[in-house]
Amino acid sequence: MQTKRLLKVAAVGSAVAMLVAACGGSTSGDSSSSAAAGGSAAPASSAAAAAPGGAAYAGPVGEGEGQVNVLAWPGYVENGSTDPAVDWVTDFEKETGCKVNLKTFGTSDEAVKLVQGGGWDVVSASGDATLRLIYGDSVQPVNTDLVPSYADIFEDLKLQSFNSVNGVPYGIPHGRGANLIMWNTDKVTTPVDSWADTFEADSPYAGAVTAYDSPIFIADAAVYLMATQPELGITDPYALDQTQFDAAMALLEQQKALVGEYWSDYTKAIQAFNSGTTAIGTSWQVIANLAKAEGGKVEATKAKEGATGWSDTWMIVNDTPNINCAYKWVDHIASPETNAQVAEWFGEAPSNAKSCDLTADKAFCETFHAGDTEYWKDVYYWNTPTATCLDGRTDTQCVPYSEWATAWSALRS
Amino acid sequence: MSISRGTKIVLSIFAVIAFGFIYVPLGVILINSFSVDKSLTWPPSGFTTEWWGKAVQNEGVREALVTSVGVAVVATLLALVLGTLLALALGRYAFFGRESISMLVILPIALPGIVTGIALNNVFTTFLGGLTIVTLIVGHATFCIVVVFNNTIARIRRMGGNVEEASADLGAGGWTTFRLVTFPLMRSALVAGAILAFGLSFDEIIVTTFTAGPGITTLPIWIYQNLFRPNQAPIVNVVAAALVIVSILPIYVAQRFSNADERGAGLI
Amino acid sequence: MTTTTATSRGFGYRHPNLRLAGLLSAPMAWLVVVYLGSLAALFLTAFWTVDDFTGQLVRTFTLKNFQQVFTSSAYLGSVVRTLGIALLVTLFCLVLAMPLAFFMARVARPSWRPLLVALVLTPLWASYLVKVYAWRAMLQPETGVLGWFLAPFGLDSPGYGFLGIVITLTYLWLPYMILPIYAGLTRLPDSMLDASADLGAKGGRTFRSVVMPIIFPSIVAGSVFTFSLSLGDYITAQIVGGKVTMLGNIVQTTYVTNLPFAAAVATIPVVIVLLYLFAVRRSGALDNL
């Protein structure tokens, strides 16, 4: 890391040094040459390259280093400062001697940027960030033998395409949720089971539709297209070739005419649904619960076309000086007691099978479909689109995430 | 005075309406701080004093408040030194490039916060090995310099150079003159500038997001986290309402310190 | 100042250039190295590109980011819209601030003035985010506070969108316009107004020919803030903008995945603000700032 930084410093001065620095990482080397050629060619060899991020920690997990720097989604790490009753950090600090320094982020993009900036030991990354972190050499493989809690994690969350590479795990699953379709029952009187009213031009709710404001929402359009335009041949909403991608963007342009507002913070989403400003649109289970708790007339369900969703992963940053504290932390956060508390506070399905017995609300795991394998079958967890198609196609190139981001900003501007 | 009675009445009515425009949203904040709705749904479906009680006990608010005050104090002190030096140079000397410098000092506040934010973030993370509380203070001080500078240079211009020359003629050295003559004359302008710099730093969110290091939670960051994930959004309104009430005193004091006619437009 | 010696006259007085250098070195080092240096480094990246996959910088010269921005009608539309918002906000602030500042400086009793100024400044202490959220409640269609005020006139709130952004930003930056104008008006000597009246000028004429020229630099000074703060905002658009976005939103959504592109977009508000500053520098407003 230190040498890389020095190279970066030198890079400003001379063009020669620039190339050296760009080649500093094993994966960026070949892509820089392809970028120089002017195209958006794939970093083709990256998937086949040796495991990024080096080797996993051999252990054993010893004495803590005194602190652990944690990057997390808001609500994942609570030390009692938000609400004195909500605290799964203080005891951890007492037991392990690892002081938890927390910073929260608002989007996956922000998380990636922060990790790349350095100074962090662990991060709770969603699937649209994990692969970027792995292939950017920002995180290291995890030795699950050193994480006792891993044994009780739901099997259908382990070794997924967004948290492992070639069977090597890069983190500990944290929790999951599906992106639901939600509606205000005053405005939408018949129950909805399809995304159609949020996408189709003849929707009766024009001007009152909402959508999630992030490039990853392009995948939601792709999920709808999988069901409605099978001739496009989409099998994975995160592996879109140019034709499929253009179809998804066209659908989103069509949707934009219907949209009243896009949301990314969920205070706004709840307020919009409860006031009726928004009639129908994308939502999360936790938003539906909070909206109902405030007397909002809303219902939410998973649409019949399937849905996107997220499964978050605790990852350990490459070159962390606090490796023991980092391992202690990921084990702690995935342990049944903590996992139950986090899942209930945040409002998502827990990842640890044993945590379902420990939730305060005994129906919690049922509400959130925690162990319901069938439920999650048509949920496509957020993933990072890459030029090498994630669905295994080798005869074509897929549109990489950076172009998803630019396309989204163009759609929104 | 040449203002007719009719004009005065019209202006008075307008002033009432304008102050209404300024204070109705603050009233909404106050009402929302008693709302039972965690998501600030309007109109509130019920009222409670729960949030005020929770705010008092809330450790996060207190810690964030301490951090914010600390950052704002240090950034203000830095800005005081740098802004005063710059004002003395520009107010007392004519030299090539003076105009450019007076534009340069305005830039950090005139350019969009997001530009300043990502520019500093980019440099700090690339060359300085990451973000800390120091990078946050550096970021804040950069855009606070201008407020101190504005207040101070307006005063220096009005002061003229005569008193300093007189001091020098009487045998005082440069430092003695500054200590006994220039500084006392500038003091009220410095206080006004310092309070405004403090306020600017205290409520800054965009540059803060991009320059704060691990675990550093200033009050705006705390607000951002609690407002956008509504486990207890109304508590944020409590904090905002309390800040407004608490702030009236220092603002009033600042007003008394700086005679309006000498302050120039330097309130920002 | 460290150059001062114990002689009866300071060393610096005999060597003004050294004294000037002493005064300038620290602040200039800060502004040039820390600030301009950072900006330069950012805009340098606008000519680079990113690795498609990891999002890390690839340092090869390219103009494609600028091409992308300036050939897309979507982005150009955003530039026009953002400029329109910034200009409208400035105009609205001016229309509200002029009479209010005039009232404060010329109509209200002098002993009230510190209190009135404090009243104008107070909202600045309510957190920016909280105020924008308060405007969400104000602007809400049908049941919002603004709708309630407008209902007797048969009007409804404009809702979330372009006008919502303009109103909210006007609210946020209004104090920055009131205060310079107020300060300018308090400097206006009574004798000047009396002289104008004695020479037979009516109120309107006095305002145009006497008041305006004197407070014009104050107006420009205020507009620097209302204009440039609006130009760079993005959080307001997120909260009350409906589906309307501003330039800042493009920078914000792309800077992580594609810093070079974000930097290219960011050059637009920077160039606009610089042009504006150069234009108003002639008015002497910057001395007045």
Image: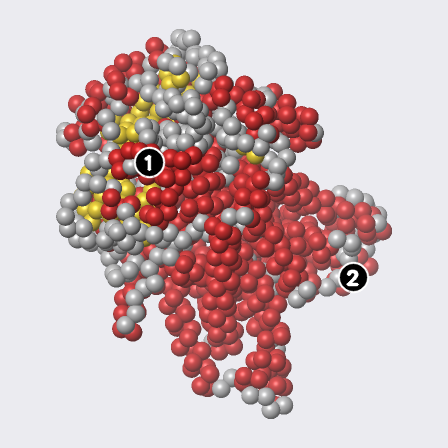
Which quadrant holds the C terminus of chain C? Answer: bottom right
Residue C256 is situated, as x and y percent measured from the top left of the image, at 48, 36
Q: In this view, does A234 lie above or below A409?
A: above
- Is residue A180 visible in this depiction of the protein? yes
Mark 1 or 2, which is nearer the eye? 1
Which residue is at a point 15% across and 51% down the rendered structure image? Answer: A189
Which residue is at a point 33% across and 34% down the rendered structure image? Answer: A232
Q: Are marks 1 and 2 in contact (CB under 8 Å)?
A: no
* Residue type highlighted by circle 2: Ala
Give the quarter of the image for residue A191: top left
| Residue holding disc 2 | B166
Give the quarter of the image for residue C49: top right
Q: With C67 as the anchor, is A180 left or right in this view?
A: left
Q: With C79 as the anchor, is C171 left or right in this view?
A: left
Q: In terms of secondary structure, where does tag 2 sit?
A: helix
- Estimate the spatial distance between the alpha carbons at disc 1 and disc 2, rounded to whole Å: 79 Å
How many labels sit on residues? Answer: 2
| Same chain check for tags 1 and 2 | no
Residue B90 is situated, as x and y percent measured from the top left of the image, at 72, 55
Q: Is residue C89 above or below residue A219?
A: below
| Residue holding disc 1 | A222
Q: In terms of secondary structure, where does tag 1 sit?
A: helix
- Is residue B254 visible in this depiction of the protein? no
* Residue type highlighted by circle 1: Ala
Residue A163 is situated, as x and y percent measured from the top left of the image, at 36, 21
Q: With A213 as the anchor, is B201 left or right in this view?
A: right
Which residue is at a point 30% across and 58% down the rendered structure image? Answer: C140
**Toward the viewer: B267 or A47?**
A47
